[in-house]
Image (cartoon, helix red, strand yellow):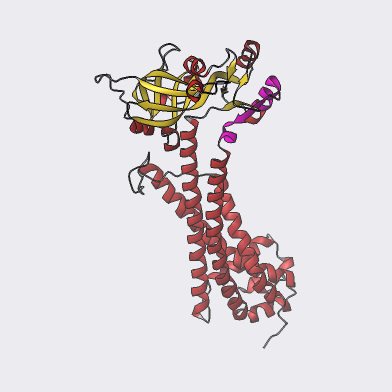
Amino acid sequence: MPIAYCLLPVNSLPFNYLALYLTFAWRYFKAKKSANAINIIAWVTVSVIAFATCCQILVLSVFNGFEDLVKSLYSSFYSDMKVLPARGKTFTLTAEQIAALKHDPAVENISLIAEEKALLKNYDAQTVVYLKGVDDNYPRVSGVASKTNRGVYNTGTANDPRLIVGAGIQNAVAMNVDPAIPSGELTVILPKRNSSNNDPLQSISEGNVKAAGVFSIQQEFDEKYAITNIGFVKQQMGFAPDEYSAIEIKLKEKEDPPVAKDKVQKLLGSNYIIQTKYEQNTSLYNTMKLEKWAIYGVLTLILIIAAFNMVSALTMLVLEKRKDISVLQSMGTSKGSILKIFLSEGLLLAGIGAAVGILLAALICLLQIKFKLIKLEGGSFLIDYFPVKLIVTDFLLVATTVIAIAFVAAWFPARKASRQGFELR
């Protein structure tokens, strides 16, 4: 230890205390120890912390990438807000209410919806679908039209309805959308609303639609939804002129969904349920967050294991530096200052490991973003590489976790060092 550090008590040094503690910690870290095992354990601790930190950043970044991808896919189908009936399957909406909704400052556009489960038949092939009758504004509130990659997006009219289905439904009923190959009409079987006839056959309606297009968004939608003209669905089901199943709303840019939701709720009243895009997919978003933090918790266990190595390294260092501690005590260094010196040693080990891990993870993520180095196996997903997204708060969270664990791990050997009795031989 340099004489300059030994001649003055710690509390009389002219420079910042933190810098002094870190200087002691750095000298102890790089100094040659009498037992080589101390150096080995210290470097193992740094390496494990760097590895765990790197893994945490990488995993969180990959989850961020997948979360963004899934959100973009769901955003192609779900609107910013959706109005549903508080009771039953349908609600009535007056022309005045529709006009008020369209003129709301937060609303960009709205689409009126009539939706019901139906049976779709193409000769002998048939499947159950969620038939969604939409108006002409639907492409302005949803991205389904932009995801229609075969045929064309065209819902037709009430008297000449056209059908757009998901790719899974197309395969299930062998629906043809190639204009070069003539295709027959599809049959849609729907239940009639408010039918009082005891004959089941009189309680359902059959209508014919022509195939128009196929969309591909995500398996959940591709195998479930078919879209056609709202007038056709209302006519087949016996809806009243002002009766609907839902309203889908596109908000203006920079509008806060919860605030806009409250405005629309006040405008329409308590007979309607308003859902934001998040609330329409609560289970999905909650599951994604739960998975993300579960993996984060598992990787934090690696840091806790590294903390045991840190306890060992610092305990051996305290035994190694007993004479140094006694010298500092003889010069008037307080127990608190000695404790802070060895705490700083633990935080230094954690800081070096965290810095190396964060830099390595950032480098890997940037290379993945630019060159798509790590591929997804199977080739059945929409992309063939792992998506990643770097978020500053993830870096701060991981760094804070490392420092917190290191502080707790370093506390016990540092406390032992501060309680060492004065002894010079």
Above or below, comparing residue 232 to residue 5 in the picture: above
Q: Is residue 392 left or right of residue 217?
A: right
Q: State the residue at coordinates (70%, 65%).
A: 13
Above or below, comparing residue 376 to residue 310 in the picture: above
The residue lying toward the viewer, choosing from 115 and 328, is 115
Q: Is residue 220 left or right of residue 184?
A: right
Return the x and y of residue 132 as percentages of the image width and height. 48, 24
Magenta highlight: main SS: helix
Image: magenta residue range: 261-280
User: In the picture, which quadrant includes the N terminus?
Assistant: bottom right
User: In the picture, which quadrant includes the C terminus?
Assistant: bottom right
The residue lying toward the viewer, choosing from 58 and 234, is 234
Above or below, comparing residue 19 to residue 287 in the picture: below
The residue lying toward the viewer, choosing from 191 and 416, is 191
Q: State the residue at coordinates (46%, 47%).
A: 62
Q: Is residue 148 visible?
A: no
Number of numbered tags placed on the structure image: 0
Furthest-left residue in this view: 180
Return the x and y of residue 17 as percentages of the image width and height. 69, 62
Q: Is residue 424 visible?
A: yes
Return the x and y of residue 127 as percentages of the image width and height. 40, 32
Task: Find out whether residue 272 is within the magenta segment.
Answer: yes
Furthest-bottom residue in this view: 425
